[in-house]
Image (cartoon, rainbow, N blue to C red):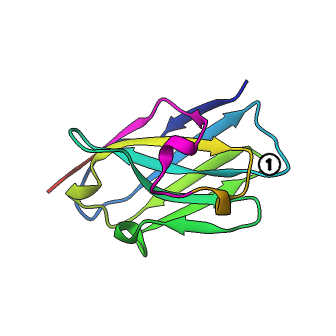
Amino acid sequence: QVRLVESGGGSVQAGGSLRLSCAASGYNPDRYCMGWFRQAPGKEREGVMIIDNEGDIKNAASVKGRFTITMDNAKHTLYLQMNRLNPEDTATYYCAATRSLCYNFHLEEPEDFPDWGQGTLVTVSS
């Protein structure tokens, strides 16, 4: 069974930074695509960034240049470094994973990812 546990959320002022972590257990495939999605109250879940074992990265235009996604394979932990946060980034952030490469998946279709964490809340105040 796959277990994904997010951490690192919190409250920050606009312009600040946070680093989210997603610890994966029971997940050591030859191929993977993992990433971050977020959902604000009253809005649909949207893709943020995803990365696979070959280094292919997809990102939402709204976070390009501000967020960085990395994977520590030794620790089986996915990270999302978020800089220059603004109130529009306020949401619950979820870690997702699948046993395939990212070219098979899209930020616009989060429902295709089979494994999810419980989420961590990020609140950015102005």
Residue 122: image location, x then y, percent: 33, 44
Q: Which residue is mark 1?
A: 74
| 120 inside magenta stretch | yes
Which residues lie in the magenta part?
106-122
Residue at 73% in and 44% down:
76
Residue, far right: 30
Q: Nearer the viewer, residue 45 or 20?
A: 45
- Residue 92, located in which quarter of the rendered image? top left
Tag 1: Cα neighbours inside 10 Å, few (<14), some, or many (≥20)?
few
Residue at 27% in and 65% down:
15
Q: Is residue 82 above or below residue 64?
A: above
Q: Is residue 36 visible?
A: yes
Residue 23: image location, x then y, percent: 63, 38
Q: Quadrant of the N terminus?
A: top right
Residue, far left: 126
Residue 93: image location, x then y, percent: 41, 43
| 115 inside magenta stretch | yes
Q: Is residue 8 visible?
A: no
**Left or right position of 13 against 53:** left
**Left or right position of 108 against 99:** left
Q: Is residue 72 above or below residue 68?
A: above
Residue, far bottom: 65
Three-letter code, disc 1? Ala
Q: Is residue 117 above or below residue 67?
A: above
Residue at 50% in and 41% down:
111
Element type at mark 1: loop
Q: Is residue 76 above or below residue 101?
A: above
Residue 69: image location, x then y, percent: 56, 61
Residue at 60% in and 67% down:
57
**Left or right position of 121 against 87:** right
